[in-house]
Image (spheres, grey):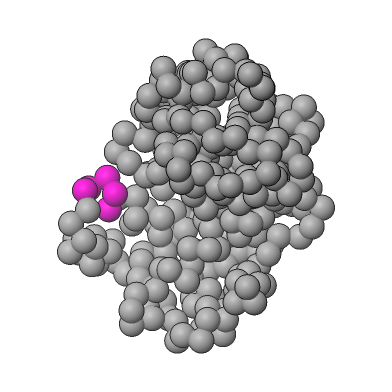
């Protein structure tokens, strides 16, 4: 029986993990794709799909046997996401994984404003205590999400005030991850804050979105009370609404501000700004 690749990638059926898997395949890197449904795994040269779930420790440990380097995309937002992360990190350590590369969030801290950033911080700490070598990729807010923030009326609503963020293109995060995964020994114990090239307010983003999408986009600064009231009709659980609203309040608090050179350091190219991202997206 042929041995499985010793590089494992999670999230290959999703956006970021899928991009990383395709980049690795293009670079002729054999990889093990850890997926919850092998039928949905992308068909890539040198890629072998293996059944694995973050929440199923025994299954994950089996799937990770023989893995040296693991790319761990944070799990889908869920009330028990942190428990899923803990289970998977522990399974990786138990399976003998040598190096884990984790996608965290810019400014992750136990008391950060963005509620889900606290889970990322706790996951980072679990990884650091696991005994495995590690690299942390702390992604800023995705530029990819900005066009989706506007409602059908073209208005972005949220309590971000005049705050700014150094939003990053998902493609730049994927390219950064590729650089780490291709030479993990160079990045042991490092944390990289991955950002776009400049700080951006939602008012400025609306102007660029209007120019780049053909829609008329504007930004309305909600009060905190308005933000919760406007999201109430969705019927989402409280933890989810808190996460939505705190995305904006984290921007208002300045916790997503501050461009870094990390993307250039890892990839050798400048990160995409919003205008370039929109132009690239519309040229596809």
Foreground pick, 148 / 162: 148
Q: Position of residue 196 (x, y in %)?
A: 65, 59
Q: Is residue 281 above or below residue 173?
A: below
Foreground pick, 60 / 194: 60
Residue sticking out furthest to the front: 1
Q: Quadrant of the N terminus?
A: top right
Q: Position of residue 59 (x, y in %)?
A: 43, 21
Indicate the quadrant where residue 230 lies: bottom left
User: Image check: 72 left or right of 242?
Assistant: right
Q: Is residue 176 above or below residue 163?
A: above
Q: Is residue 193 visible?
A: no
Q: Position of residue 283 (x, y in %)?
A: 64, 77
Residue drawn at (52%, 81%) of the image: 213
Residue sticking out furthest to the right: 268
Residue drawn at (60%, 77%) of the image: 282
Foreground pick, 24 / 144: 24
Total number of numbered discs in the rendering: 0
Read off the magenta span: 237-241
Q: Is residue 120 above or below residue 166?
A: above
Find out whether residue 98 is within the magenta segment. no
Residue drawn at (17%, 64%) of the image: 233
Q: Position of residue 166 (x, y in %)?
A: 59, 59
Q: Is residue 186 visible?
A: yes
Task: Kindly report the secondary structure that dominates the magenta region of the rendered protein.
Answer: helix
Q: Quadrant of the C terminus?
A: bottom right
Residue drawn at (40%, 59%) of the image: 248
């Amino acid at each position: 029986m042929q041995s499985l690749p010793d590089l494992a990638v999670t999230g290959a059926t999703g956006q970021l993990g899928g991009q990383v898997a395709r980049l690795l395949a293009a670079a002729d890197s054999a990889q093990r794709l850890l997926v919850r449904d092998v039928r949905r795994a992308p068909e890539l040269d040198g890629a072998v799909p293996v059944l694995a779930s973050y929440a199923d420790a025994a299954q994950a440990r089996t799937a990770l046997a023989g893995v040296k380097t693991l790319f761990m995309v944070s799990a889908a937002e869920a009330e028990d996401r942190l428990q899923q992360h803990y289970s998977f990190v522990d399974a990786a350590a138990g399976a003998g994984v040598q190096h884990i590369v984790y996608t965290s969030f810019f400014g992750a801290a136990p008391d950060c404003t963005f509620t889900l950033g606290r889970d990322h911080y706790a996951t980072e700490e679990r990884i650091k205590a696991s005994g495995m070598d590690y690299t942390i990729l702390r992604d800023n807010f995705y530029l990819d999400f900005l066009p989706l923030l506007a409602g059908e009326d073209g208005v972005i609503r949220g309590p971000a005030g005049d705050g700014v963020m150094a939003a990053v293109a998902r493609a730049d995060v994927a390219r950064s991850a590729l650089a780490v995964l291709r030479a993990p020994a160079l990045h042991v114990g490092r944390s990289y804050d991955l950002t776009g090239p400049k700080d951006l307010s939602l008012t400025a983003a609306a102007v660029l979105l209007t120019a780049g999408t053909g829609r008329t986009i504007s930004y309305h600064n909600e009060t905190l009370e308005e933000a919760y009231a406007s999201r109430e009709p969705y019927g989402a659980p409280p933890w989810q609404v808190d996460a939505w609203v705190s995305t904006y309040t984290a921007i208002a608090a300045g916790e997503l501000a501050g461009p870094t050179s990390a993307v250039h350091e890892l990839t050798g190219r400048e990160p995409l700004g919003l205008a370039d991202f929109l132009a690239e997206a519309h040229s596809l």
